[in-house]
Image (tube, rainbow, N blue to C red):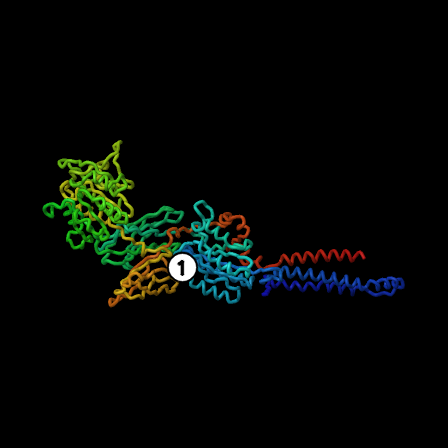
């Protein structure tokens, strides 16, 4: 049995010396009497001799009781504490103390010269010190909220514990991850179950910034995963201690998104990126600069107008990528309350040229009379892909032999009809993300298009075609109807003037219902109309699965329109192609806090040794560089496979741009970029007040809950009840007083 005593007020133990006061009084009272011989007293002396032994015993008993009362009172005021696996034989008393340290991204909030996480680490050490002073022989577990395993697992509370804690906390830092306790409680339960009867109960210590978005649901109640996790832990008598480590300021601006405005980035074609900034504050922001850079190079700064509270604004930046391959763009804000969301990165893969397939439904006698002649000239004028588009020409007979997966955009120009098998192949390709652009013309079979491509709104076409309309002698001009669409962004006014010079003589009508309204597919947008904003549709688009479909109701050549000869034709067609290309999937190398990137490399071109490091160093000065080895692919021995991810059971230690360095055989080092982003709502710094949090706990938890903040009167002694046995001493003192009073009365009546 381990038994240890300590005193919270040891200086008051000197009061135990006052236990000698009754003895001194007794001795002094005996010396007060003067002996006088008196004849009559002889009878009394004879009687006194008969009862002297009994009286001495009674006096001694009262004296000891009175001395014990004083000693117990002094001992009680000194507040003795005991820690024992089996306290005085009264039963198991060891406690399993579990400290949960919230290391989510919001604890990186600035507070004075440091961050909130610094205060949280300090609180953990204070808790451990207090446990060490009062609960020797207990067990302690330290668990960071973002980890799938404990930093310290059921360690005995000894004098070496603080050193272990310091070592564990030295490497701790706020991560890009959010506070998610589900897996955490499962791990704690396993450790506690392993302790079994060695610990009689479990006490939880949560050190957190208590953000509302982490703990409270939309209904204003504490989230069920947290309550369920606490309920699932044993020891209904164990206490729940809540230690807030937070700063009062909640003003914060954060970059929540960098969005490409085109389907993919292509060399020599300007790529546009929209940077969204959100104001998480309750007040309107001031005007501020927004920075933008590519591959860590020169930084461009633009001023951003004030943002209303709980709202966002965006700026668009244009980038000309000088080379194909992997690149990374970064946006940044001035330093404010939370550094985590002041920077955001997006890794992109740039193509040298997008692959476009032009399917000609009316080749013509000469190449310049073909349906796709002007399309090819607009998209790939040099026929070498130097424009960013590499065009392949085919016709309706050769089309079935083409592998659609090799192309990013397919254009059907005046195709009469498609076999059902080819329609199904096109549907699968578009549904998987491909882009399809359809031009009509005199070869189009309206009935075939309705049955195979419209399919009552379930097919590829944005709308059902009707008869050909229009008069070449009375042409109409295109009018923009969706000025906010990315297709027209930044060029709306200029393009409107150019389109006013274009003439469209003939076009296909869109079928109307019995009420005279145009029949449009679900989600279809009309981007251009003829004549005015209420005129016949000219350009329509809709989403189909992960891809998109556009339809021009006139020809791609000059037979029905003067447009192919106008300057606006290559401008709009190039922009339209950019929008409709098969989107490049950026998700593999733009990761969340715990994301992983599965990378395949050619074993002939790359060595297996890889290095991972952040593009910018860590503020703590600690190196975050890691090495790993790619392994041979079991299915294809000519390839190497590598899983680029954080340490097992942990999130990425830092948000932002990261670099993967590869060693090319005989060609030196190569770089590939990837990014790590925090949860978009991590910038909401509003905290849960003490009253609201405790009120949200179920009654059985609220009875055991203790909120320990800076102003708390019990901050220095939050574990008082865990080790003190003052109740036992108080009852003993009361018993001594009652017994002394009874015996004094009883002995006085002899």
Quarter containing the C terminus = bottom right
Q: Nearer the viewer, residue 704 or 310?
A: 704
In percent of width and height, residue 739 lies at: 72, 57
Name the residue furthest left. 365
Compare residues 468 and 217 and report the one nearer the observer: 468
Residue extending furthest bottom?
Answer: 666
| Residue at 76% from the left image edge and 57% from the top image edge | 744
> How far across and how far down the image is residue 368, in percent?
11, 47
Compared to residue 689, the image places residue 473 above or below, namely above
Report which quarter residue 500 is drawn in. top left
Question: Horizontal and vertical percent for residue 71?
Answer: 67, 62
Query: Which percent across, then down, holds residue 16?
Result: 66, 63
Name the residue tied to disc 1: 650
Q: Is residue 355 visible?
A: yes
**Which quadrant, please, contains the N terminus?**
bottom right
Left or right: 678 in relation to 727: left
Classify 556 as above or below 109.
above
* Numbered marks: total: 1
| In the foreground, 487 or 497 | 487
Which residue in the rendered view is the most extreme toward the top?
Answer: 515
Q: Is residue 714 left or right of residue 373?
A: right
Q: Quadrant of residue 503?
A: top left
Q: Secondary structure at mark 1?
A: loop
Question: Relative to 325, is 162 on the left or the right?
Answer: right
The answer to which image quadrant residue 632 occupies is bottom left
Using the image as rendered, state which of residue 311 and residue 458 is in the foreground. 458
Q: Crowding at label 1, few (<14), some or many (≥20) Cα neighbours within 10 Å?
A: some
Residue 298 shows in this picture: no
């Amino acid at each position: 049995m381990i038994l240890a005593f300590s005193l919270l007020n040891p200086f008051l133990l000197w009061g135990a010396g006052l236990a000698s006061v009754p003895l001194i009084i007794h001795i002094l009272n005996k010396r007060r009497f003067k002996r006088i011989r008196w004849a009559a007293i002889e009878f009394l002396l004879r009687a006194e001799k008969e009862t002297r032994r009994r009286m001495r015993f009674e006096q001694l008993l009262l004296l000891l009781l009175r001395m014990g009362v004083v000693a117990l009172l002094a001992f009680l005021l000194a507040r003795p504490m005991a820690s024992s696996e089996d306290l005085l034989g009264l039963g198991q008393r060891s406690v399993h103390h579990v400290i949960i340290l919230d290391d989510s991204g919001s604890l990186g909030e600035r507070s004075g010269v440091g961050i909130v996480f610094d205060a949280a680490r300090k609180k953990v050490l204070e808790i451990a010190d207090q446990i060490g002073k009062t609960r020797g022989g207990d067990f302690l577990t330290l668990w960071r909220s973002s980890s799938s395993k404990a930093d310290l697992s059921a360690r005995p509370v000894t004098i070496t514990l603080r050193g272990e804690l310091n070592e564990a906390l030295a490497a701790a830092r706020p991560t890009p991850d959010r506070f998610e306790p589900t897996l955490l409680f499962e791990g704690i339960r396993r450790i506690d179950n392993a302790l079994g009867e060695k610990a009689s109960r479990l006490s939880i210590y949560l050190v957190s910034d208590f953000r509302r978005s982490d703990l409270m649901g939309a209904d204003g109640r504490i989230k069920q995963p947290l309550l369920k996790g606490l309920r699932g832990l044993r020891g209904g008598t164990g206490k729940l201690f809540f230690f807030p480590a937070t700063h009062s300021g909640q003003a914060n601006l954060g970059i929540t998104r960098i969005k490409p405005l085109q389907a993919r980035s292509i060399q020599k074609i300007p790529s546009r990126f929209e940077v969204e900034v959100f104001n998480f504050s309750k007040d309107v922001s001031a005007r501020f600069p927004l920075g933008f850079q590519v591959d860590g190079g020169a930084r461009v700064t633009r001023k951003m107008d004030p943002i209303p509270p709980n709202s966002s604004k965006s700026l668009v930046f244009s980038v000309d990528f000088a080379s194909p391959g992997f690149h990374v763009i970064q946006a940044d804000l001035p330093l404010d309350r939370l550094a985590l969301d002041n920077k955001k990165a997006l890794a992109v893969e740039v193509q040298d040229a997008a692959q476009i397939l032009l399917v000609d439904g009316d080749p013509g006698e000469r190449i310049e009379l073909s349906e796709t002649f002007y399309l090819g000239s607009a998209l790939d004028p040099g026929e070498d892909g130097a424009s960013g588009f590499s065009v392949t020409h085919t016709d309706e007979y050769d089309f079935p032999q083409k592998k659609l997966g090799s192309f990013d955009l397919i254009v059907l120009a005046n195709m009469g009809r498609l076999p059902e098998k080819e329609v199904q192949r096109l549907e699968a390709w578009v549904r998987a993300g491909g882009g399809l652009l359809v031009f009509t013309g005199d070869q189009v079979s309206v009935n075939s298009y309705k049955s195979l491509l419209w399919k009552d709104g379930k097919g590829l076409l944005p709308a059902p075609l009707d008869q050909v309309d229009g008069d070449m002698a009375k042409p109409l001009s295109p009018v923009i109807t969706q000025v906010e669409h990315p297709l027209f962004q930044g060029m709306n006014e200029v393009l409107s003037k150019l389109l006013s010079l274009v003439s469209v003589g003939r076009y296909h009508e869109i079928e109307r219902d019995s009420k005279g309204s145009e029949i449009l597919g679900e989600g279809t947008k009309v981007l251009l109309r003829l004549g005015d904003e209420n005129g016949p549709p000219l350009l329509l688009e809709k989403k189909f699965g992960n891809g998109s479909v556009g339809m021009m109701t006139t020809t791609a050549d000059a037979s029905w329109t003067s447009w192919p000869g106008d300057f606006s034709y290559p401008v709009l067609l190039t922009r339209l192609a950019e929008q409709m290309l098969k989107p490049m999937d950026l998700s593999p190398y733009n990761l969340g806090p715990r994301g992983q990137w599965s990378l395949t490399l050619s074993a002939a071109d790359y060595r297996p040794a890889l290095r991972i490091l952040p593009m910018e160093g860590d503020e703590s000065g600690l190196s975050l560089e890691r090495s790993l080895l790619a392994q041979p692919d079991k299915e294809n021995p000519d390839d190497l496979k590598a899983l680029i991810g954080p340490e097992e059971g942990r999130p990425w230690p830092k948000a932002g741009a990261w670099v993967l360095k590869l060693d090319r055989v005989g060609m030196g080092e190569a770089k590939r970029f990837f990014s790590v982003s925090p949860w978009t709502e991590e910038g909401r710094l509003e905290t849960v007040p003490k009253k609201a949090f405790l009120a949200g706990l179920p009654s059985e938890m609220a009875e055991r809950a203790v909120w320990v903040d800076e102003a708390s009167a019990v901050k220095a002694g939050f574990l008082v009840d865990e080790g003190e046995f003052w109740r036992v001493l108080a009852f003993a003192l009361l018993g001594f007083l009652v017994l002394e009073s009874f015996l004094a009365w009883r002995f006085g009546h002899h």
